[in-house]
Amino acid sequence: MLQGKNVVLGVTGGIAAYKACEIISGLKKIGANIDVIMTRSATEFITPYTFQSLTGNPAIVNMFQSPKYWDMEHISLAQKSDILLVAPATANIIGKVAAGIADDMLSTTIMASNRPVVFAPAMNTKMYENPAVQQNIQTLIKRGYHIIPPKGGILACGDEGQGKLQEVSVILEELQKIYRQELQGERKDLAGIRFLVTAGPTREIIDPVRFLSNHSTGKMGYEIAEAIVARGGEVKLISGPSSLSAPKGADFLSVETAEEMFEAVKDAYPKADVLIKSAAVSDYRPKIREAQKVKKESREGEIQLTLVRNPDILLEMGKIKAPGKIHVGFAAETEKIIEHSKEKIQRKNLDFIVANDVTEEGAGFAHSTNIVYFIDQNGEYSKTEKVEKSAIAHEILDRVLEKKFPADK
Ligand code: C5P
């Protein structure tokens, strides 16, 4: 998403200033061009030369220092940038921008920018909780600035609480998401289309304390639901157990077992135009669900767990697929991806399949990235690069649109 784009990174004077180096290396891996603007106090923690060496661009501190750049630098960087990130953001820069003060290069550039500006605050817990800071953050949010909240933990000063700079990987992911949402904010191309999306694993109950499940986190399906909302579509998200929070704007239903998911999908299907089944449904469940905890003391030696087949939801829905509806399946394969997927498209009556080779680095479960093949009914396929799951979500939706309105293409 940010490949070839210009990111202005504002670094302010907090102990987490050194983490800006890690952010730069992450941005460089993505292929972004980075210009660093530091506040005077940031230079007490880290030198401009460090950033200059890492980015290959001069790190700017003083508005009036460099004769080559000084005159219109704040305007030119504000215009050149595709997105601005302030990380770490101190209470001071947050307060200045909230109050409209522009007295150094960073605050001036932020004020002169019409691009998305993202703040990743980091400060002492008591400072962060201070009502003035909280109110300033609210002011920024109301004005359309973005905040990546700090996380909790033991801070550099020894205090414990919220105030640590968010994980760099989270900052990078959020930054890309914000950039994409800004780009697609105006694109409401899914308006009027109703989606039914499943996500996450299922849990198959053994007894009141045990279950069978898999490594699915639900991320892919949640990203799809978020992307649908961003593009103006309607979405019902039926999710197995996941630690992710329900996407804003989605009609969310949480289920536990494959059988519960099947019932929920059947209920919601008549109101959907598109079914996207990204859930990693357990193919089997224990034949007997024990009412009481299985005690080792009550059974000698080995025990047997008999499994029975769960309904294949996608297969069953494929049998009653209504004309005009679009069904998208997922496949996690370890070999013969194309061959297996082609067979699955026919058997499950799908429009296309999103398949990944879970043995590939950076693909499949529990990764924020994925590498997928899009395989069509006629066997044609294309493979993506290793990209964020959010980017894949949008590509899936683009393909749904192509299927729905082929004459337009
Ligand atoms: O056959 P396989 O499990 O590889 O197919 C994967 C696809 O089928 C996914 O889209 C998954 O959500 C769906 N599926 C299902 N019910 C099952 C197993 C898989 O809907 N019991």
Image (tube, rainbow, N blue to C red):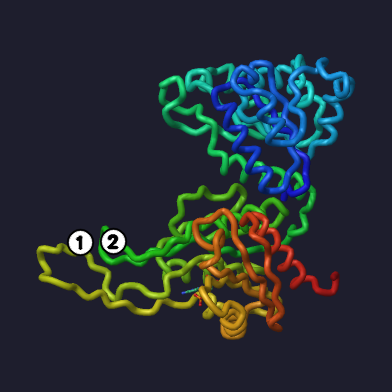
Q: Residue at x 68, y 44 (%)?
A: 28
- Residue 166, given in percent of the width and then of the height, sits at 54, 35
Compared to residue 233, the image places residue 169 above or below, namely above
Quarter containing the C terminus: bottom right
- Residue type at mark 2: give it: Arg
- Residue type at mark 1: give it: Lys
- Residue 11, given in percent of the width and then of the height, sits at 66, 26
Q: Residues within 10 Å of mark 2 (few under 14, many from 20)?
A: some
- Residue 244, given in percent of the width and then of the height, sits at 50, 50
Does mark 1 have its CB less than 8 Å from ligand 1? no
Residue beneath label 1, please? 293
Secondary structure under tag 2 reads: strand
Dividing the picture into quadrants, the one containing residue 303 is bottom left
Q: Residue at x 62, y 70 (%)?
A: 354
**Residue 318 seen from this side:** no
Secondary structure under tag 1 reads: loop
Q: Which mark is residue 332?
A: none
Query: Mark 1 vs mark 2: which is more N-terminal?
Result: 2
User: Given contact means CB atoms under 8 Å apart, are the residues at marks 1 and 2 in contact?
Assistant: yes
Left or right placement of residue 147 versus residue 188 in this view: left
Q: Residue at x 46, y 54 (%)?
A: 242
Front residue of 221/122: it is 122
Front residue of 139/377: it is 377
Residue beneath label 2, please? 210
Q: CA distance from mark 1 to mark 2?
A: 8 Å
Q: Residue at x 50, y 21 (%)?
A: 124
